[in-house]
Each structure stands twice: as C-alpha cells, then as structure tokens.
Amino acid sequence: MAPTYSIVCEEFYAVRQHLYDLIGALSVDEMRHSPSAPPYLCISALFAHIAVSEDKNTAEISRKAPAEKALAAALEVYATTRDAAALPSPPEILDAARRVRDNTVAFLALPFRAVKDEAHATTLAEPFRGIINNE
C-alpha cells in the first residue's frame, strides 16, 4: 500500500492535471471570452485565480513568498480593467499553474513522509484543506 502522503500528492496532482487538460483544449479566443452574465470573468482570469490562490495559500503555509507574482499582478490589473489582454497568454497561465502545482505537491509531501497512522494523517492534512479547495 502506498504511503498516505503519496496518495494525497498523487490525487492532488491528478485533479489539477485534469483541469489543465480541459483548459489546454480551449482556443485563445475561448479562454479570453468574457460572458455577458455575472461574474463577467473570462476563463483565463478564473484559471489564473486558481493558480494565484493556490500559490498564495502554499506560500503562507510554507512561510515563503508567492512564486507567481507576475501572474498575481496581471490578475489584479484584469480585476480593475476587465481587459483580457492584461493577462498573460493562456499557455503562459497554464505553465504558471503547473509550476504552482509542482511547488504545492512538493510542499504537501514533506510532512506526510512521517505519518504514523490515519489519525495523524488527518491532523497533518487539515492545514492543506484551503490549498486543495482553493479557499
């Protein structure tokens, strides 16, 4: 049986990869299209938000600076202007999201290497709920 940390990291990685596969199949026009109904955000902005939120949450828990500062800054400009051109290209957002995911998985794996039992794993997992759920 795989160690708990392996299962957590593999599942997290797989969920994110599924999202990246869905996003990767969209054209640039589809990614930058803004709907005419709330929340009025293009898919690129929503996808960038997931990456930026995960990056900030991981950074906060690991006591490090967020890695994707340029993406976060571009998302702030988009939030003010609603101009999709303010965002990096969809492939650049996807690359940033993959870097964030890889950083998160590496960080998630650290405490789980010493898991003693299921109760200990549950206790260790609690701080990561926000990362996994993008809270």
Image: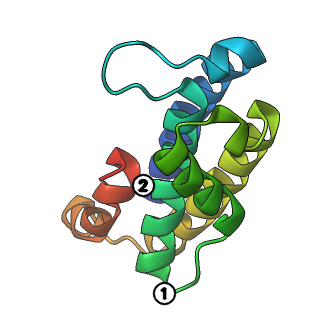
Left or right: 103 as drawn, with respect to 4: right
Determine whether the residue tagged by mark 1 lies in a helix, strand or loop.
loop
Q: Position of residue 100 (x, y in %)?
A: 64, 56
**Looking at the image, which residue is at 57% across and 33% down?**
14
Find the residue positioned furthest to the front. Answer: 81
Q: Position of residue 114 (x, y in %)?
A: 44, 76
Left or right: 40 as drawn, with respect to 2: left
> Which dot marks residue 4?
2
Left or right: 24 as drawn, with respect to 37: right
**Looking at the image, which residue is at 70% across and 63% down?**
70
User: How many numbered circles are shown?
Assistant: 2
The residue under label 1 is: 63
Find the residue positioned furthest to the bottom. Answer: 63
Q: Would you call the spot at circle 1 few (<14 residues within 10 Å), some (14-19), or many (20 or more)?
A: few
Determine whether the residue tagged by mark 2 lies in a helix, strand or loop.
helix
**Looking at the image, which residue is at 56% across and 60% down?**
104
Image color mode: rainbow
Q: Position of residue 6 (x, y in %)?
A: 53, 52
Measure how far apart labels 1 and 2 are at the Cα level.
24 Å
